[in-house]
Image (tube, rainbow, N blue to C red):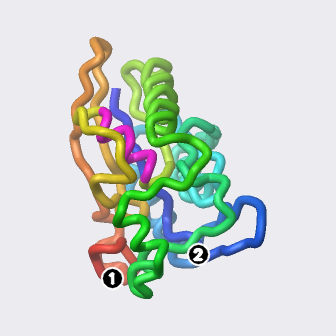
Amino acid sequence: MELLLIRHGLPVRRELQEGPADPELAEAGLAQAERLGAYLASEHLDAVYASPLRRAHQTALPIAAAHGLPVVTEDSVAEWDRDSSEYVPVEELKAANDPRWQAMLRGEWNAEETPQEFRQRVVDGIERLIAAHAGHRIAVSCHGGVINGYVAHVLGLPESNGFFYPNYTSIHRIAAARGGERSILSLNETAHLRGTGLPVGIFQGR
């Protein structure tokens, strides 16, 4: 089967005093998601899953609509900081040299789960989806940490905050064989954003 792990589009900035921030997509993020849905419309998909967080669910909607499928919520692919009371796009943190950006560079972890628990949750959940979709192609709208966790697992890398940066609405394809073999087919596909003027990510401009 083929697994498409997809990072959500650009969210709004939200900083609360308490409670999960759980931001929705910004206007540019909604446009990114629409481009993504049109890009994947020509590919057959058997199911579309999304993290319970709003930015991932909204990203999945145009994909599901193009295929006449529902968006199925999958809790195991929620981000490691799902309960954080603040969400600031990393590009803004980097541009301001915010202390939170420096903490990210140091690999600091601030979540209820340990890095090991987070990765195990992600791997177990994705492997469960793979087992349920033998011979299928499925899309999973999720988060940068989730993508890093599962790809690192496939590559046999240790737990970390992230060894690479997934761009907004980027596609990461993995082939999963019945015998347990996992092969990375592509990382960071963003052809649907090329020439649109929409933001791509921290290392690329518009």
Q: Is residue 80 left or right of residue 200?
A: right
Q: Quadrant of residue 5?
A: top left
Q: Residue 55: x and y, percent?
A: 59, 60
Q: Is residue 173 left or right of residue 129?
A: left
Residue 174 shows in the view: yes
Q: Could you tell me which residue is drawn at 28 percent across and 56 percent down? A: 164
Residue kind at label 1, given as amino acid type: Arg
- Cα–Cα span, label 1 and label 2: 16 Å
Q: Which mark is residue 206?
A: 1
Q: Could you tell me which residue is drawn at 38 percent across and 58 percent down? A: 107
Q: Residue 110: x and y, percent?
A: 54, 55
Residue denoted by label 2: 26
Q: Secondary structure at mark 2?
A: loop
For the C terminus, give its image quadrant.
Answer: bottom left
Is residue 103 found inside the magenta-colored segment of the image? no
Q: Quadrant of residue 137?
A: top left
Count of numbered labels shown in the rendering = 2
Q: Quadrant of residue 178?
A: top left
Q: Is residue 32 left or right of residue 2?
A: right
Q: Could you tell me which residue is drawn at 34 percent across and 74 percent down? A: 202
Residue kind at label 2, given as amino acid type: Ala
Task: Specify which label sits upstream in the sequence, 1 or 2.
Answer: 2
Q: Measured along the vertical axis of the image, is residue 152 above or below residue 99? A: above
Q: Which residues are magenta?
A: 145-153
Mark 2 Cα-neighbour bin, 10 Å: few <14, some 14–19, many ≥20? some
Q: Residue 48: x and y, percent?
A: 53, 40
For the N terminus, give its image quadrant.
Answer: top left
Residue 43 shows in the view: no
Q: Measured along the vertical axis of the image, is residue 7 above or below residue 150? A: below
